[in-house]
Amino acid sequence: MTPEEILTHIRNIPNFPKQGILFKDITTAIQKPEVFHAIIDNMYDKVKNLEFDYIAAIESRGYLFGAPLAYKMNKGLVLIRKPGKLPAKVVRQEYSLEYGTDALEMHEDAIARGQKVLLIDDLLATGGTVKAAAGLIDQVGGKVTGGLFLLELKALSSQANLPFSVYSLIKC
Ligand code: AMP
């Protein structure tokens, strides 16, 4: 299944969670096993030749793709979480989204100095979320190899100026 075919299984919800946002609903894609397989297999093809030690997945939809990809690639999975969820000592980074503001946290001992990390999330819009995630990796001395996304909203991401490579399956 091609990325274009995968896109036909992603539902557009206008004005969610607020007016003016066209929400890309991936639930309709991942509930079909053949589409979920195709997403992970296409993601694998995008990053199979990259060098990295960990996949760091961004809560919460990043987990849906980060976990099976880490399993398939035999890489460690690091969780980047919303505030207050991780039990041990964390590093923290504030950020702003397409809608609202928030912060992300990661265990400070999750990644050692010099280790290479592939960030993963479902969607890249303004880049604020993945930049904050990259900030966490920087804080502990890790190195971001790239950011992997199922969807990239071109109109917004073109302004993002991310200091690492972006690998997206579908630009729309
Ligand atoms: P941004 O920080 O602007 O790049 O936004 C990316 C984050 O917000 C991702 O974690 C997405 O899950 C979520 N997000 C932003 N815009 C949308 C959208 N139009 N549809 C679905 N999720 C979105």
Image (spheres, grey):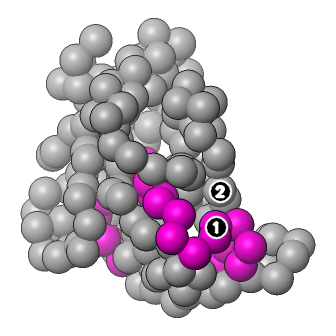
| Residue 45 appears in the picture as rendered | yes
Residue type at numbered disc 1? Ile
Q: Which residues are magenta?
A: 105-128
Secondary element at tag 1: loop
Tell which of 7 and 104 is nearer to you: 104
**Quadrant showing the N terminus:** top left
Where residue 81 sits: x, y (%)? 66, 67
Establish if 19 lies above or below 104: above
- Does the residue at mark 1 contact the one at mark 2 (Cβ under 8 Å)? yes
Q: Residue at x 65, y 56 (%)?
A: 78
Badge 2 local density, few (<14 within 10 Å), some, or many (20+)? many
Taking the magenta stretch, the answer to whether it contains residue 148 is no
Secondary element at tag 2: strand
Find disc 2 in the rendering and name its residue: 78
Find disc 1 in the rendering and name its residue: 111
Is 124 situated left or right of 39 in this image? left
Establish if 102 lies above or below 13: below
Q: Quadrant of residue 156?
A: bottom left
Where residue 85 sits: x, y (%)? 80, 71
Establish if 29 lies above or below 22: above
Residue type at numbered disc 2? Val
